[in-house]
């Protein structure tokens, strides 16, 4: 007797009509036609069952603060940073926790059960850190939340930037962050990368830096980050987020840079929605859109995962917590439209991001955590095309969110009475 059997599910790796049996919060068996009974059985009817979505780059301390204290009229990164600087002195723990918990509720409905969030440490009061530590504890039963100590105003540029970041780590923040391109000079940016990697190595912590989030092709702090990763033996524990300057670099330099990133075994986290919204603001036409070189990085064997980054905050007035929306935009901005490309993009939202976050017992395999999402789609390509409805979200074998399928009733002479967008439109691949 199992606790739950999900019948006839398709899996992201191409296996079709698989039964997934769950017992005691773990996947007990995956096979066609499992001859057993369960306390609850659900027929997936050939729909896609996926591991939960993972967001390796987010700003939960700012989420849902859109309009506070005013709107970002220019839509630029720098006005967003200035707005956050105006809002920060007014922040309270209660308000931060309330907004973050509301976002986590939304995340669960989207099958998003692991998030890495950057927490601003620039204000020495560290109100944001106290609030996010509380949120982490409160959502632990259903969301894995990792915290990055993020010196938004610069590790050296902010008056107490270095000391505040160290105090945040002492309070229990998990990961060392940085923003070298926002320091006053290139030299100070390089020095911040060196100091932060040394700090991470001394404490045995991972690193995740906002790196080269600019159109300037001469912003090359990722080179220093990769070199420091190797120097301190941090391979596999370092992520470079954004890397948008790589979009503007010349091909010869990139031909040297990508192998260095691969040698360092770095994780790379583009943020498609935000990158194409905020970059290229000084261009007329031709107009750069700023997302880093995703196909080339993937081809070099580098672990590429995608972040949502922002939802309704000073930098981005949109967003829904749906990682399929992120992947949908990645397909377009990276021009990765083949079936194989779409599989790579989907994997970047699940297994690649899980690798970036170092999640244990993740994935649809026997013995792993019974965490999964049932989608109103047959396969990853269709899930991305439709930004598919998350019909069931299961955590440790328990259904924690349920959404009715998107079905439209039609009243047309001689035509079907209803339409399911996931049936009858795409070819059989």
Image: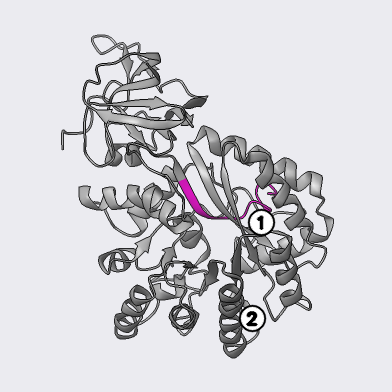
Residue 91 shown in magenta:
no
**Which of the numbered marks, if any, corresponds to residue 183?**
2
- Cα distance between the residues tagged 2 and 1: 21 Å
Residue in the foreground of this view, choosing between 142 and 252: 142
Residue 129 as seen in the image, left or right of residue 248: right
Residue 284 x %, y % = 46, 71
| Residue 181 appears in the figure | no
**Which of the numbered marks, if any, corresponds to residue 59?**
none
Which residue does the image show at 61% across and 60% down from the upper left? 174
Residue 336 x %, y % = 27, 56
Q: Which quadrant would the C terminus be assigned to in this image?
A: top left
| Residue lying farthest to the bottom in this orientation | 187
Which residue does the image show at 56% across and 41% down from the upper left? 143
Residue 387 x %, y % = 39, 38
Total labels: the figure holds: 2
Q: Which quadrant would the N terminus be assigned to in this image?
A: top left
Residue that label 1 marks: 314
Which residue does the image show at 76% across and 54% down from the upper left? 130
Question: Magenta stretch?
Answer: 54-67
Residue in the foreground of this view, choosing between 414 and 335: 335
Query: Which of the colour schemes (rainbow, by chain, secondary structure, one colour) is used?
Result: one colour
Residue 205 as seen in the image, left or right of residue 29: right
């Amino acid at each position: 007797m199992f606790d739950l059997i999900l019948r006839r599910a398709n899996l992201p790796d191409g296996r079709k009509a698989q039964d997934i049996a769950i017992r005691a919060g773990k996947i007990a068996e995956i096979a066609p036609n499992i001859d057993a009974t369960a306390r609850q059985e659900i027929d997936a009817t050939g729909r896609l069952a996926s591991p939960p979505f993972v967001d390796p780059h987010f700003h939960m301390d700012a989420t849902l603060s859109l309009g506070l204290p005013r709107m970002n009229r220019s839509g630029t990164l720098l006005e967003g940073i200035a707005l956050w600087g105006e809002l920060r002195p007014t922040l309270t723990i209660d308000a931060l926790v309330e907004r973050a918990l509301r976002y986590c509720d939304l995340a669960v409905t989207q099958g998003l059960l692991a998030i890495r969030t950057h927490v601003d440490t620039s204000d020495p009061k560290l109100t944001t850190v106290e609030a996010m530590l509380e949120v982490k504890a409160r959502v632990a039963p259903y969301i894995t939340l990792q915290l990055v100590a993020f010196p938004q105003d610069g590790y050296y540029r902010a008056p107490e930037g270095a000391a505040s970041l160290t105090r945040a780590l002492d309070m229990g923040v998990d990961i060392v962050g940085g923003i070298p391109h926002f320091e006053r000079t290139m030299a100070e940016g390089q020095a911040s990368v060196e100091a932060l990697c040394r700090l991470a190595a001394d404490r045995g912590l991972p690193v995740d830096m906002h790196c080269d989030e600019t159109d300037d092709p001469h912003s090359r702090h990722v080179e220093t980050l990769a070199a420091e990763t190797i120097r301190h033996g941090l391979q596999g524990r370092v992520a470079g987020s954004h890397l948008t300057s790589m979009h503007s670099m010349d091909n010869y330099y990139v031909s040297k840079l990508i192998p260095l990133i691969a040698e360092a075994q770095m994780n790379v986290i583009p943020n498609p929605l935000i990158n194409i919204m905020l970059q290229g603001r000084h261009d007329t036409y031709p107009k750069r859109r700023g997302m880093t070189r995703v196909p080339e990085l993937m081809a070099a064997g580098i672990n590429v995962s995608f972040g949502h980054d922002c939802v309704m905050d000073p930098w981005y007035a949109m967003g829904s917590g749906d990682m399929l929306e992120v992947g949908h935009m990645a397909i377009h901005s990276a021009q990765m439209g083949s079936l194989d490309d779409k599989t790579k993009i989907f994997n970047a939202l699940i297994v690649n991001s899980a690798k970036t976050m170092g999640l244990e017992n993740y994935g649809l395999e026997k013995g792993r955590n019974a965490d999964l999402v049932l989608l109103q789609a047959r396969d990853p390509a269709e899930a991305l095309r439709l930004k598919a409805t998350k019909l069931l979200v299961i955590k440790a074998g328990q259904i924690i969110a349920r959404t009715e399928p998107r079905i439209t009733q039609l009243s047309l002479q001689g035509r079907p009475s209803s339409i399911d967008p996931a049936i009858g439109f795409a070819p059989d691949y």
